[in-house]
C-alpha cells in the first residue's frame, strides 16, 4: 500500500502518522520525499487497513493498494527517478546518457589500459571489463580473476574511469571492495543468496536480466538487493533467449520503456551480448537510446580477432568512437525536441 501525503504535511505530523501506522497495523513504513510530495510505502500485511479511514486524515492526499510483489523497486512507491552518482561525479539515471565500454575479458595490462584510454577519449564515462568470466564451456578462458581485478584498478588509476566488473559468488565480495559498480550477470540474476549479500553493501549493483527472465522476475531480483538495504540498483536489458538463433539473444527493447514505467531504477542496454555480432551494435545502440535507455554497456577490444572472449561482438576503438558520436548526437537531438 502507498500513501501520498499533502505538500503542507509538517515533519511532526509525518513522524506521528508513521508511528501510528506501525503501531496500529504492524507494518513497516518506508518514506520517499519527492520535490512535490512525500510518499509512504507500507510493507507487510495491509489487508486489515481501512483505506477510507486513512484517506480521511487531513494530511493524506491519496491511498492506493499495490498488487505487484516488488515494493521497493516499484515506481508507485518511489515516483521520482533514482539517480546513482559515482565517486567521480558520473550520474546514472538523471536524464543523460552514460556509456560503459571496455573488453569482455581483461587479458593484460597493456590491453586493458590501451582500451581504457581509447574509450575515454571517445566519451565513455565508465570502464567495463571481465576479471571473472562465466563460460558455457569449462574449457574456455575463465578470466584472470584476482589479477584481472588488479589490472582494472590499474586502468582506473591511469584514466580516472570508474570500473564495472562481474562477480561470481558470495565468497568473492571482499575482493570487490574497491570496484565502483558490481555487475551481476545473466547466469546469477536469480542467485538469491548472492543478491541478499549484495543488498548489504553501499555500492551500485548492475543487475542483468536472465536468459529467460520475465520483466517481473528481473524486478524481483532487484527487490532482493533492495530488501537488504541497497537501493543503488541499475537494471540491464541484455537480450533474452527465444526461438531465433541468428543473433546470440533477442534484444527486448520494449523492456526499456516498460521497466521505466514500472520502476524508478535506471535502465541500461547491452547490445553486444544481445546480438553477438559487432555489426549490429551500432543500430541496436541507437534504438536503445530512442527507447529511453539511461546508458549502454558496449564491448570494445583493440584486436577483436585475437580476443580471448567474445571477439565477434566486440567493436574496435575506431568503431566505438563512431557509435559514441552517433548515440550522443541522437540523445542531444531527443533532449532538445522533448
Image (cartoon, grey):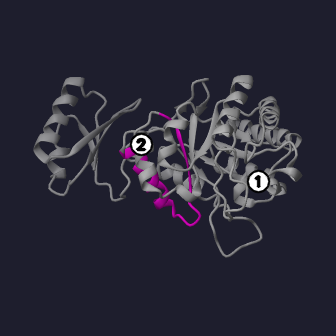
Q: Residue at x 77, y 70 (%)?
A: 246
Query: Residue sitting at 79 percent across and 52 percent down?
Result: 308
Which comes before the other along the chain, label 2 or label 1? Answer: 2
Question: Which residue, given by chain and number where applicable, does mark 2 sit on?
Answer: 199
Of 183 and 8, which appears nearest the observer?
A: 183
Occupied quadrant, residue 91: top right
- Seen from the viewer's position, the closer of residues 5 and 302 is 302
Write down the residue under mark 1: 309
At 64% from the left and 30% from the top, the residue drawn is: 162
Residue 4 place in picture, x, y as percent: 30, 40
Above or below, comparing residue 25 to residue 136 in the picture: above
Q: Residue at x 82, y 50 (%)?
A: 307
Disc 2 from disc 1: Cα separation? 30 Å
List x then y, in percent, for residue 104.
73, 48
Extent of the magenta region: 203-227
Number of residue marks = 2
Determine whether the residue tagged by mark 2 lies in a helix, strand or loop: loop
> Percent position (x, y) of residue 256?
59, 53
- Tell which tag, 2 or 1, sits nearer the viewer: 1
Asked whether residue 329 is drawn in magenta, I would say no
Is residue 240 positioned above or below 315 on the image? below
Q: Camera-side residue: 74 or 185?
A: 185
Tell me where residue 165 appears, x and y as whole percent: 62, 42
Amino acid at each position: 500500500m502507498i500513501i501520498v501525503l499533502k505538500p503542507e504535511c509538517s515533519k511532526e505530523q509525518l513522524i506521528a502518522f508513521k508511528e501510528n501506522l506501525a503501531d496500529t497495523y504492524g507494518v513497516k513504513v518506508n518514506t520517499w520525499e519527492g520535490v512535490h510530495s512525500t510518499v509512504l510505502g507500507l510493507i507487510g500485511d495491509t489487508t486489515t487497513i481501512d483505506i477510507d479511514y486513512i484517506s480521511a486524515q487531513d494530511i493524506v492526499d491519496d491511498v492506493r493498494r499495490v498488487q505487484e510483489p516488488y515494493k521497493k523497486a516499484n515506481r508507485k512507491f518511489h515516483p521520482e527517478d533514482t539517480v546513482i552518482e559515482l565517486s567521480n561525479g558520473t550520474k546514472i539515471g538523471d536524464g543523460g546518457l552514460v556509456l560503459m565500454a571496455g573488453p569482455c575479458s581483461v587479458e593484460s595490462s597493456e590491453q586493458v589500459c590501451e582500451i581504457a584510454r581509447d574509450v575515454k577519449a571517445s566519451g565513455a564515462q565508465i570502464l567495463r571489463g571481465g576479471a571473472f568470466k562465466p563460460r558455457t564451456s569449462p574449457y574456455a578462458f575463465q578470466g584472470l580473476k584476482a589479477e584481472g581485478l588488479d589490472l582494472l584498478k590499474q586502468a582506473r588509476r591511469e584514466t580516472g574511469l570508474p570500473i564495472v566488473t562481474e562477480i561470481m559468488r558470495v565468497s568473492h565480495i571482499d575482493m570487490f571492495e574497491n570496484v565502483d559498480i558490481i555487475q551481476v550477470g545473466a547466469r546469477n540474476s536469480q542467485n538469491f543468496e548472492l543478491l541478499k549479500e549484495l543488498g548489504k553493501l553501499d555500492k551500485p549493483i548492475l543487475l542483468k536480466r536472465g536468459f529467460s527472465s520475465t520483466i517481473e522476475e528481473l524486478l524481483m531480483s532487484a527487490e532482493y538487493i533492495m530488501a537488504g538495504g541497497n537501493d543503488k540498483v541499475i537494471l540491464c536489458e541484455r537480450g533474452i533467449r527465444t526461438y531465433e538463433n541468428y543473433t546470440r539473444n533477442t534484444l527486448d527493447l520494449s523492456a526499456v520503456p516498460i521497466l521505466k514505467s514500472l520502476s524508478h531504477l535506471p535502465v541500461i542496454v547491452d547490445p553486444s551480448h544481445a546480438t553477438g555480432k559487432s555489426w549490429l551494435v551500432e543500430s541496436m545502440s541507437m534504438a536503445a537510446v530512442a527507447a529511453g535507455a539511461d546508458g549502454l554497456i558496449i564491448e570494445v577490444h583493440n584486436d577483436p580477432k585475437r580476443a580471448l572472449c567474445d571477439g565477434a561482438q566486440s567493436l574496435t576503438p575506431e568503431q566505438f568512437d563512431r557509435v559514441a558520436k552517433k548515440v550522443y548526437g541522437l540523445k542531444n537531438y531527443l533532449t532538445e525536441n522533448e
